[in-house]
Amino acid sequence: MNLFGLQLDLFGATKQEEAPRKPLVSADFSESSLVTFKYSSHLKKSVRCSRSAFFGKPELTLPEFMRDNSFARSREIIAEWAEHVMHRKTAKNKAVCKELLDRFWQSVEQTLADKGEKSLSMRGRLPPIVTKGDVHDLNEVFAAVNSTYFNDSLTARITWSNRVGGLSFHTVRKDPFTGEDFHLISISRGYDKENCPLYAIAGVVYHECLHIMIPPEEHNGRRVVHGKLFRQHERRYIYYDEWIKWHKEVLPLNIRKMRKK
């Protein structure tokens, strides 16, 4: 489909490459082998740290559900925390320990959310990153928009919104695993319908991508999100008029049907 006015099939089928095999992850030791993991069914929202009786290395007792490989990255964060806990209690080391412990629980929450399981706490939790919808794949749309309009310069994560409302939005969030900020684009599920053409879903993704390239400005004490420069760039989308028409006329109908369900 000539979606962006280019002689390119940006949404054509791609060759499926065989996925590389994932390396085996030990649930008993950290990657450095300096920290030993044990598990207890009595723990849920806490961890215990002690010294190994034989080698004096940190020994962590974690909730039983963290034995699963999906928590491997979280285990590495808490292993780093355990190594710092064993050091002298300086102000700097205490601050590092607090930051690592916060990241650990946030990463656990994120993993639970991605797995669709019950949250331990809402603190610091991100929405599940879901890119494949019933009709559209957001990763494919974002890649096409990023390549066509931004020369592949944008770095962001994109997901279908878990809100029932019709709003799509862009926010800056903190990665629970690395502690780094990242751009998160959430797209209304009203666009994930059979009656939504590719130019419409690409239009809203392009709009949210512009928020990354053109951040809000302050004018006379007011925060301006959709300023003159933003609107000029927005109209560069080749199907701008068609997208706006669909957005105003069809999206509200899709949202009402979703709310009734």
Image (spheres, rainbow, N blue to C red):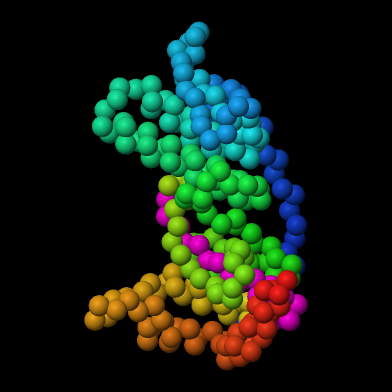
Residue 91 in picture, x, y percent from top left: 26, 32
Numbered range of the magenta stretch: 180-198
Nearer to us in this view, 120 or 35: 120
Q: Quadrant of the N terminus?
A: bottom right
Considering every residue shown, the one lying at the far top of the view is 54
Considering every residue shown, the one lying at the far front of the view is 260
Q: Is residue 150 left or right of residue 190?
A: left
Residue 229 in picture, x, y percent from top left: 38, 83
Residue 4 in picture, x, y percent from top left: 61, 82
Residue 96 is drawn in which quadrant? top left
Q: Compared to 132, does 241 lie above or below?
A: below
Residue 191 is covered by the magenta coloring: yes
Q: Residue at x 60, y 85 (%)?
A: 247
Q: Residue at x 38, y 72 (%)?
A: 215
Residue 11 is covered by the magenta coloring: no
Q: Compared to 94, does 233 lie above or below?
A: below
Q: Is residue 106 left or right of residue 250?
A: left
Tell how many labels: 0
Residue 195 visible from this viewpoint: yes
Q: Residue at x 49, y 45 (%)?
A: 106
Q: Is residue 250 left or right of residue 150?
A: right
Residue 23 in picture, x, y percent from top left: 66, 35
Q: Quadrant of the C terminus?
A: bottom right
Residue 153 visible from this viewpoint: no
Nearer to us in this view, 207 or 53: 53
